Amino acid sequence: MTNMELKPARVFEHFAKINQIPRPSKHEEKMIEYLVEFGKSRNLDTKVDKTGNVLITKPATKGMENAPTVILQSHIDMVCDKLVDLDFNFHTDAIQTYVDGEWLKAKGTTLGADDGIGVAYELAVLDSDDIEHGKIECLFTVDEETGLTGAFGLEPGWLTGEYLINLDSEDEGQIFVSCAGGIATDSVFKFKREDAPAGYFFMEASIKGLIGGHSGDDINKKRANAIKILGRFLYMQQSKMDLRLAEWNSGKLDNAIPRDGKVVFAVPSAKKEEVMADWNIFTKGVEEEYHVSDPNAVWGMESTEARPVVEKEVGRRIVMAVQAVDNGPLTNCQDEAIAYMVETSSNVAVVKTEENAITVIASQRSNVPSALINMANTIKACFEMAGAEICQHDAYPGWKMNPNSKLVKVAVEEYKKLFNKEPQVLGIHAGLECGLISEKYPNVDMMSVGPTLRFVHTPDERLLIPTVQMVWDHLLAILKNVR
């Protein structure tokens, strides 16, 4: 990445430095060290709480001492996903970026702009001596992607700001003022391994090359789900013949639509040609079904070595449950003003096989608390009926819109001055840390903005370069004029 080609240079320089630092969720130690050194080397008040969140405070610039304190907030962890065949270690390797037209991309991995670009904005503000602002508190939270651990661990009284600008949204020109809450449902099927019956033939079905995406923001884009597709095929075959499940692995994160997967199963040797023929017919049909959203799917079916299989009844119930479970958007919002937005959804995100257990992870979202509970209970009931042990966790609240927000009013006015057009003021189906932060700081006026990102949580993640400058200009205008 040539930083001189990217504007604002200060923001992109910080983003480049951030992408040299490994920062998987729950493994942000090096990033925390970097931020602490960054703050202290500039003689800025720098604190780390017991959860690992970092707070760096910058005094007001001359003439702005009476302006209200503004909190800027982003998360320092990133979703770690890569192309199946790429040799890359997110715990040690730097993200390799390149420019493709107006987009910044990574070579075969997630880019880390979610939310590295938000972190870069904050560092650029802290590093600038040519901008006007009141007192600023830059909050960097940990583990947003796999549990919102930082936001959960944030203690009341640590922040003093009157306003908070979250820098973790993905569409320039849109100001987000509310978000969905969520719950994760883990369903664990336990079993004893046994040998397949004599004369059974082992096969491996696979799919890769799906688009995937964020399980909140992209859930309404009609993208294929690798787990549901493999489950459909297994259910069809199981209904016709004795199928013995051995291994099933698909998906990596509970907040991403799974884009690849493999399943190993055994069938009577006399049925293997029938399975292969059915697979060819099935995949052609699915290709047509998703010819717009997922045109680059790669299918595989091959023989594989024999191995112990899951107990027959347990394997049958796993396949039935994955076929039956709800997936995707359930309803849109009832209020006419936000009827465009998904209200309630679920995403079957991960299937992983261990020696004596197969776990299915699904995430539910809704901006209506009762609907969220109902969706989570629907998923729970489906897998309970199939005999799984259920654990529901990582519940986080939605963020309710403040119709009298002074911050949003200033943001809208400054956007119109800068770009001669109205921004959109919206809610989002994804989860933002604002929901948890607002529970602990109910009197803080909040909003969320960010540059345009596409295909987040996938190796196709990309950042629209011109929008980074637009958000920077908008952010500085807000900091200068908010009162």
Image (tube, helix red, strand yellow):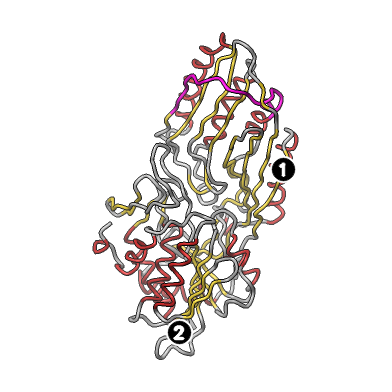
Give how far across and how far down residue 378 sits, in percent.
71, 42
Give how far across and how far down residue 469 sits, in percent.
33, 66
Q: Which residue position holds label 1?
A: 390
Say which of 99 and 375 sits in front: 99
Dot 1 or dot 2: first in sequence order is 2
- What is the CA distance from the residue labelled 1 to the residue labelled 2? 49 Å
In the image, which residues are magenta?
Answer: 299-317
Give how far across and how far down residue 245 sits, in percent.
61, 25
Which residue extends farthest top?
Answer: 270
Residue at 43%, 67% in the rendered image: 34
Disc number for residue 157: none
On the picture, is 193 further left or further right than 8? right
Residue at 35%, 77% in the rendered image: 128
Q: Amino acid at mark 1?
A: Ile
On the picture, is 298 further left or further right than 330? left
Q: How many marks?
A: 2
Q: Amino acid at mark 2?
A: Pro
| Residue 224 versus residue 2 in the image, above or below | above
Residue 242 image-quadrant placement: top right
Give how far across and how far down residue 342 sits, in percent.
58, 50
Say which of 383 and 310 sits in front: 310
| Residue 4 versus residue 79 in the image, above or below | below
Which quarter of the image is occupied by the N terminus? Answer: bottom left
Query: Which element type, helix, strand or loop, lies under badge 1?
Result: strand
Residue at 60%, 40% in the rendered image: 327
Query: Which element type, helix, strand or loop, lies under badge 2?
Result: loop
- The crowd level at tag 2 (other Cα within 10 Å; few <14, some 14-19, many 20+) is some
Q: Which residue position holds label 2?
A: 59
Q: Judge whether residue 356 is colored magenta.
A: no
